[in-house]
Image (cartoon, rainbow, N blue to C red):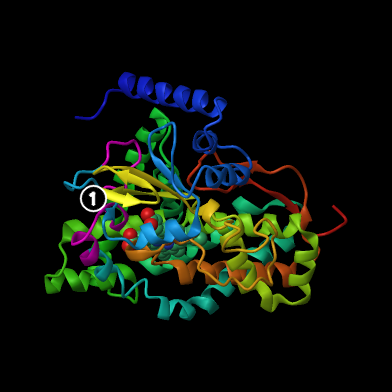
């Protein structure tokens, strides 16, 4: 049964008060949940408590790269309770790939694979370049300071995903608006209003996609919907699974990539010697994307559940123990990344960062997201070499997705 508005508001208020109190008492995980501007010193505190520590909130937490990597690849951990139940929570990916364990996960991942195949990601390069150039043409023509987030970073990933999924031109405006309203699902739904608004957005995107699916049936194209329709015909997936699968892609791939672009440009402009290096050598843009994913990843944390009693890192975890994997902290583990707080686009990143997770849930859009960031950074550096910050940034309010809401910049010194 759904909790009532009053119950939900009360539960949320108690939860937030509890976190605040625990943060004040010095619990480092609670400090991260309180969404500080800079969570990175708190990850060091988490690491100082041990490879795995039990937070005051109850979950076990790690910011140790090696241990996090081991847990993510260990099949005794999953994303649901041992009996297959979803966790009671306000945020939910329902039955998407991210929210289910094998064998359902294996089947859903196989279905999405032809569309999100890393080997085909490079085929997107010229289209991504075209979108970036169009956006930058518009900004240069306006010739005034602009907000990098709304005018550039938010535009590129949604345009790419609309192409990938197969959203016809006339539905794109609605698709962009609804996709943005769904983002609290990824960021962690924290208010009653967000629950209402995201539920309405899911209903609206479902209606829109039902329409597009009917159109694609009559007029097949080279896109995800057409490919999934073939699987429905063949009997390997049901029509009832098609729309949720397609809905999940903009959710997983938009806000994450938007903030990779925003966080990368912020790191570059805050380290002007790195920006100058990129302007001189735009071929370093792929390195800039990799280093941003290590230094300031847009997905900071994800969760695993113990499916059995497990002895690990000096603890005996009970069945259904919850673990918070702090990817943002693991990516700054000095045991793995020397001088981890230095942003260096020429760094040879020896180990995999955990920006895209590891193991069976490894991000299916990783190659595409890296390509978008690479092209975005190279194009900005080439076409706006004088780019600089032009005012204070405003951050989003999520401890899961780290990124900016506002990022004023100017392309010329004259402003
Ligand atoms: C910078 C951009 C991105 C970041 C940081 C990111 C991060 C992640 C992370 C951390 C996970 C796994 C979470 C976990 O293990 O619990 C994940 C899963 C996933 N991502 Fe991404 N992602 C990005 C972009 C994309 C894009 C562009 C797409 C698709 C177009 C995408 C599709 C997916 C899918 C389908 C999954 C589920 C995989 C599974 O459960 O097996 N992601 N992503």
Q: Is residue 156 magenta?
A: no
Instruction: State which quadrant residue 106 falls in.
Output: bottom left
Where does the image place residue 32, in percent across and percent down from the top left?
Answer: 53, 39
Tell me the residue at 58%/61% (across/down): 335
Between residue 51 and residue 331, name the one nearer to us: 51
Extreme residue toward the left, this view:
235
Instruction: State which quadrant residue 395 falls in.
Output: top right
Between residue 97 and residue 410, name the one nearer to us: 97
Task: Answer yes or no: is residue 199 visible.
Answer: yes
Tell me the residue at 27%/40% (across/down): 87
Between residue 353 and residue 44, name the one nearer to us: 44
Query: In this rendering, is residue 358 above or below 396?
Result: below
Left or right of 219? Residue 153 is: right
Q: Is residue 88 magenta?
A: yes
Q: On the image, numbered disc 1 is attached to which residue? A: 307
Magenta stretch prevailing secondary structure: loop
Across the whole image, how many numbered discs are drawn on residues? 1
Sort mark 1 into few (<14), some (14-19) or many (20+) by Cα contacts within 10 Å: many
Please tell me in which quarter of the rendered image ligand 1 is found.
bottom left
Tell me the residue at 24%/51% (across/down): 95
Instruction: State which quadrant residue 28 falls in.
Output: top right
Query: In this rendering, is residue 233 above or below 210?
Result: below
């Amino acid at each position: 049964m759904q909790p009532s508005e009053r119950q939900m508001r009360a539960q949320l208020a108690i939860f937030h008060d509890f976190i605040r109190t625990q943060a004040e008492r010095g619990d480092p995980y609670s400090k991260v949940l309180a969404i500080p501007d800079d969570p990175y010193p708190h990850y060091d505190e988490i690491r100082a408590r041990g490879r795995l520590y039990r937070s005051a909130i109850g979950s076990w937490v790690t910011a140790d790269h090696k241990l996090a990597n081991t847990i993510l690849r260990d099949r005794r951990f999953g994303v649901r309770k041992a009996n297959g139940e979803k966790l009671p929570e306000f945020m939910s990916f329902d039955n998407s790939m991210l929210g289910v364990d094998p064998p359902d996960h294996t089947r859903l991942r196989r279905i999405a694979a032809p569309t999100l195949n890393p080997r085909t990601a490079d085929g997107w390069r010229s289209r991504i370049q075209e979108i970036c150039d169009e956006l930058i043409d518009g900004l240069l023509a306006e010739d005034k300071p602009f907000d990098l987030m709304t005018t550039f970073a938010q535009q590129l990933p949604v345009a790419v995903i609309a192409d990938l999924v197969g959203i016809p031109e006339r539905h794109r405006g609605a698709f962009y608006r609804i996709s943005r309203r769904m983002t609290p699902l990824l960021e962690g739904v924290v208010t009653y209003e967000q629950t209402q608004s995201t539920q309405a957005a899911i209903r609206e995107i479902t209606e829109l996609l039902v329409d597009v699916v009917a159109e694609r049936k009559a007029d097949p194209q080279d896109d995800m919907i057409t490919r999934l329709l073939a699987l429905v015909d063949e009997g390997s997936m049901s029509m009832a699974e098609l729309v949720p699968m397609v809905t999940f892609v903009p959710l997983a791939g938009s806000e994450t990539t938007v903030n990779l672009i925003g966080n990368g440009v912020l790191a570059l402009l805050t380290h002007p010697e790195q920006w100058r290096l990129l302007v001189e050598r735009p071929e370093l843009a792929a390195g800039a994307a990799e280093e941003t994913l290590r230094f300031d990843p847009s997905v900071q944390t994800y969760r695993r559940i113990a499916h059995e009693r497990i002895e690990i890192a000096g603890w005996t975890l009970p069945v259904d123990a919850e673990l918070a994997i702090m990817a943002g902290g693991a990516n700054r583990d000095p045991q793995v990344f020397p001088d981890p707080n230095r942003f260096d686009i020429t760094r040879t990143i020896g180990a995999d960062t955990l920006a895209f997770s590891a193991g069976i849930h490894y991000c299916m859009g990783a190659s595409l997201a890296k390509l978008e960031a690479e092209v975005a950074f190279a194009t900005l550096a080439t076409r706006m070499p004088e780019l600089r910050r032009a005012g204070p940034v405003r951050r989003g309010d999520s401890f899961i997705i780290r990124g900016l809401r506002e990022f004023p910049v100017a392309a010329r010194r004259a402003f």
